[in-house]
Amino acid sequence: MANGVTYGINFPFNDSLKGDYLSLSQNPDQEIRSNLIHLILTRKGSRYFLPDFGTNLYQYIFEPLDDIIIQKIEDEINNAVEKYIPNLQINKINITQFYNNIDYVADDKKQHSVTVNIDYTVNFRTFESPGTITLTL
């Protein structure tokens, strides 16, 4: 720890053989990144006192990745960030689809995955801090 100062819990949680499932963020950039991942991966309606917290990204998992769905995913992320992390500015969202062969499925079947890459800047008074996250759904 940097002088014993921590900012919050890192997200996502990690597996640990020692029992260290929760690690603490050591700097504000790490905390913003954890908050953004937490916001995006939380389903709307799953928080009791904040039913609007999160996104509905999971409803698009089996949808065809066309321009309409890409725009809906971008809107979900932008609206959630605008409401719950107002000092974070999203510069670019890049959504790509790829296919992975799976060993345990028939040869002609493939797994569909979507990668969401978010390029952002944190504006805090006179300081700006750039960052990026990549999520695979």
Image: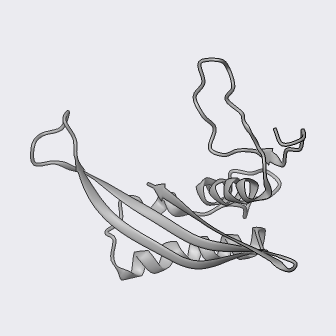
Residue 1 percent coordinates (x, y): 81, 38
Residue at image x 45%, y 73%?
94
Colour scheme of the picture: one colour
Most foreground residue, 111 or 62: 111
**Left or right: 17 as drawn, with respect to 72:** right
Q: Quadrant of the C terminus?
A: bottom left
Residue at image x 61%, y 55%?
43
Residue 103 percent coordinates (x, y): 19, 35
Residue at image x 67%, y 29%?
21
Residue 45 percent coordinates (x, y): 68, 56
Most foreground residue, 32 or 100: 32
Residue 79 percent coordinates (x, y): 66, 76
**Left or right: 68 as drawn, with respect to 79:** left
The quadrant holding residue 22 is top right
Q: Is residue 105 above or below residue 87?
A: above
**Left or right: 40 as drawn, with respect to 106:** right
